[in-house]
Image (cartoon, grey):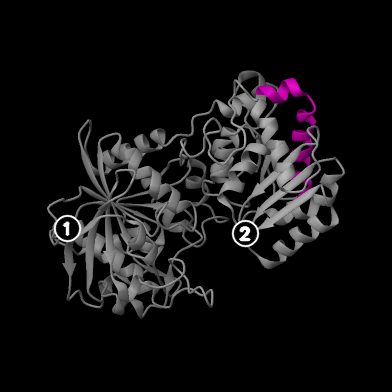
C-alpha cells in the first residue's frame, strides 16, 4: 500500500476531552487508519484537560502575527494509542474551566467561539500549505464538524494548499454567526456569498466546510441520503443535493477492546456467544444495583442516552405505564431536558421495582446496563450514526430502533425470514408515534417468550463485526480518490 499523510482536525478526542460521539471517532479512527498505512496526525485545541493529560511533549512551532488571532504554539505529543498529537496551545482562547464549547456557569456558548475555532481552522490551513513550519507535510486535511469548517476557506487562498475533506457527525450543529465575524476572522471578503459561507444572512462554519471541501463524508450511508432531503437537511439540503456525487456515507465503528463482554472490566460476570451464563448474572446484578425486582423472566428494557427531543425518549416515557403492564422492567441512565428528567424520575417513584432511573452519566453503569439488559431502546427522531446500537448487539442485547440514519444501516429488523437467514439483529419501526414504538416493543417481548428464537437472535447480534477496520478502509479509499491515486 502507498502511504498517505493526513492531518486530522477535531475539536475533541477521547479519552482526553469528550462531549459526544465525535470524540470517540477522533480517538479511534486515526489509530485504525495508522494500522493500514495512513500516517495520521491529529490537531486539537489545547484545552486544560488536553494539556493536563497529553504526556511528554515538545514545542514544534510558534505562530505570531496571524491577522486577527492571538499568538499560539504547537506542541507535539503521542497518545497512548500511538497516534501523534499536535496540540494548539493558545491560553487566551482555550485555557478555561468547563467543556470545550460553553461557559460552565451560564451554560451559554463562549462568545468568542468563532475566534477559538477560527484559529484551529487557520492553523490547519497553514499546516496544509507552503506556510507550514513543520517538516511533516500532509497530503490531505480531514476536518470534522462545524468547528473545522473554515479550514477549506483558508486553504482556498493559501499557496501550495493540499486538498481537504470534511466529515459531518451531526448536521444540526452548524456554527452560524453574525456576518461581521468574516472581517474579524480575516476570511476572503468574496467568500461571504450564497456560493460560499453565507447562510440566511449569517456566516456559517459548516456551510463553509461543505462548500469548500473536495469531498464530504458522513457517519452512515443512510444519513448521507437523509441530509439531502428537506426534513433533515437543516437548511443545507440544496447545497448537499448539488454536491451529491461528492458525498460518501461511512458507518462508524466501535472500540471492540473497550466494549467486549468477554473482558469488560466493568462487568460482574463475563460472557460470550458460546457461554451466555454470565449474561443472566449481569441482569441479576443490574436489577439488584438499580433496586429493581430480581426476576429473570421479566424482560428488562434499557436506555442510555441524552434525554432530548432528538432521541425520541418522550415517546418511551409516555408509554411506560403501558409497558410495565406487559410486564417489562425499564432502566434509564442519562440527562438532558428538564421535563424529561422529571418525567423519568416520576415514573421511578410511581413504579418502584419496575422502573429505575439515574440522572447523569456513569461509564461503568453504562457497560453494566448494556450487559444486563434484555433489550435496548433507541427511538431517535434522527441519528447520524449512533453507538449504543453497536454496543447492544455486541453484548447480546437486541436494540429496538427507529428506522433512521445509522440505526437503519446497522440494525436488521427481526422477521421470520431474517431470523432464519441469520441477519436479524433487533427490532426496527418506522414512523415516530407512540403506537409504532409500543408495537415494536410488544414484538420484541413476544419473541423473548420463545427462548429458542431469542437465543438465535442474540447469537446473530454478537456475531456482527463493528470494528473500526472496515470504516478505516473506506476512509482510506476516499483519501485515495480525492488525491487521484490508486493502490
Between circles 1 and 2, the one closer to the viewer is: 2
Which residue is pictured at 38% across the width and 60% down the height?
11
Which of the 4 quarters of the picture holds residue 396? Answer: top right
For this view, does 76 lie left or right of residue 159? right
Foreground residue among 425 and 483: 425
SS at circle 1: loop
Percent coordinates x, y for residue 178 in the rendering? 41, 78
**Residue at x 62% of width, y 40% of height:** 370
In this picture, which residue range is highlighted in magenta?
A: 434-456
Taking the spot 31% from the left edge, 55% from the top edge, the residue there is 213
For the residue pair 276 and 90, the one nearer the viewer reads as 276
**Judging from the image, what secondary structure is the residue with disc 2 in?**
loop
Report the magenta stretch's main SS.
Answer: helix
Q: In which quarter of the image is the C terminus?
A: top left
Please state, as top left, top right, bottom left or bottom right, where the N terminus lies in the image: top left
Q: Residue at x 72, y 54 (%)?
A: 357
Q: Is residue 312 visible?
A: yes
Residue in front for this viewpoint, 24 or 484: 24
Mark 1 or mark 2, earlier in chain = 1
Residue 193, x across and y down, in percent: 34, 70
Q: Can residue 217 be seen in this view?
A: no
x, y percentage for residue 294? Answer: 79, 39
Q: Where is residue 442 in the image (x, y as percent from the top left)?
A: 79, 37
The reply to whether the C-beta atoms of the residues labelled 1 and 2 are less than 8 Å apart is: no
Q: In which quarter of the image is residue 457?
A: top right
Taking the view exactly as shown, the residue that stands out farthest to the right is: 325
The residue beneath circle 1 is 129
Q: Is residue 192 shown in magenta?
A: no
Q: Which mark is residue 360?
A: 2
Amino acid at each position: 500500500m502507498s502511504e498517505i499523510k493526513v492531518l486530522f482536525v477535531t475539536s475533541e478526542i477521547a479519552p482526553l476531552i469528550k462531549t459526544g460521539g465525535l470524540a470517540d471517532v477522533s480517538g479511534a479512527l486515526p489509530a485504525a487508519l495508522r494500522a493500514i498505512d495512513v500516517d495520521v496526525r491529529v490537531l486539537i485545541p489545547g484545552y486544560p484537560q488536553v494539556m493536563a493529560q497529553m504526556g511528554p511533549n515538545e514545542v514544534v512551532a510558534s505562530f505570531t502575527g496571524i491577522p486577527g488571532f492571538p499568538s499560539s504554539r504547537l506542541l507535539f505529543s503521542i497518545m497512548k494509542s500511538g497516534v501523534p498529537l499536535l496540540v494548539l496551545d493558545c491560553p487566551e482562547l482555550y485555557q478555561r474551566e468547563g467543556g470545550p464549547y460553553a461557559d460552565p456557569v451560564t451554560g451559554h456558548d463562549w462568545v468568542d467561539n468563532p475566534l477559538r475555532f477560527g484559529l484551529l481552522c487557520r492553523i490547519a490551513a497553514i499546516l496544509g500549505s507552503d506556510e507550514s513550519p513543520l517538516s511533516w507535510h500532509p497530503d490531505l486535511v480531514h476536518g470534522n464538524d462545524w468547528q473545522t469548517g473554515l479550514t477549506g476557506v483558508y486553504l482556498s487562498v493559501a499557496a501550495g494548499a493540499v486538498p481537504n475533506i470534511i466529515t459531518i457527525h451531526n448536521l444540526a450543529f452548524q456554527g452560524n454567526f453574525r456576518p461581521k465575524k468574516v472581517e474579524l476572522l480575516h476570511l476572503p471578503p468574496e467568500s461571504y456569498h450564497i456560493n460560499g459561507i453565507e447562510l440566511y444572512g449569517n456566516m456559517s462554519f459548516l456551510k463553509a466546510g461543505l462548500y469548500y471541501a473536495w469531498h464530504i463524508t458522513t457517519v452512515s450511508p443512510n444519513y448521507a441520503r437523509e441530509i439531502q432531503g428537506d426534513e433533515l437537511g437543516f437548511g443545507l439540503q440544496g447545497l448537499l443535493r448539488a454536491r451529491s456525487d461528492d458525498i460518501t456515507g461511512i458507518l462508524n465503528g466501535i472500540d471492540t477492546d473497550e466494549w467486549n463482554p468477554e473482558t469488560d472490566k466493568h462487568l460482574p460476570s463475563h460472557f460470550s456467544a458460546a457461554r451466555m451464563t454470565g449474561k443472566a448474572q449481569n441482569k441479576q446484578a443490574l436489577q439488584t444495583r438499580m433496586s429493581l425486582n430480581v426476576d429473570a423472566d421479566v424482560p428488562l428494557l434499557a436506555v442510555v442516552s441524552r434525554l432530548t427531543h432528538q432521541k425520541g425518549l418522550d415517546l418511551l416515557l409516555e408509554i411506560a405505564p403501558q409497558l410495565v403492564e406487559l410486564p417489562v422492567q425499564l432502566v434509564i441512565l442519562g440527562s438532558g431536558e428538564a421535563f424529561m428528567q422529571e418525567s423519568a424520575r416520576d415514573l421511578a417513584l410511581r413504579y418502584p421495582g419496575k422502573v429505575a432511573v439515574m440522572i447523569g452519566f456513569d461509564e461503568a453503569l453504562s457497560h453494566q446496563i448494556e450487559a444486563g439488559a434484555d433489550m435496548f431502546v433507541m427511538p431517535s427522531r434522527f441519528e447520524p450514526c449512533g453507538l449504543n446500537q453497536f454496543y447492544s448487539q455486541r453484548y447480546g442485547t437486541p436494540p429496538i430502533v427507529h428506522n433512521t440514519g445509522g440505526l437503519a444501516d446497522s440494525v436488521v429488523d427481526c422477521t421470520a425470514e431474517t431470523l432464519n437467514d441469520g441477519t436479524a439483529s433487533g427490532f426496527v419501526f418506522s414512523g415516530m408515534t407512540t403506537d409504532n414504538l409500543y408495537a415494536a416493543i410488544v414484538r420484541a417481548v413476544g419473541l423473548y417468550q420463545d427462548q429458542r428464537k431469542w437465543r438465535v437472535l442474540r447469537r446473530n447480534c454478537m456475531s456482527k463485526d463493528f470494528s473500526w477496520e472496515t470504516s478505516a478502509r473506506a476512509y482510506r479509499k476516499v483519501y485515495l480518490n480525492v488525491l487521484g491515486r490508486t493502490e
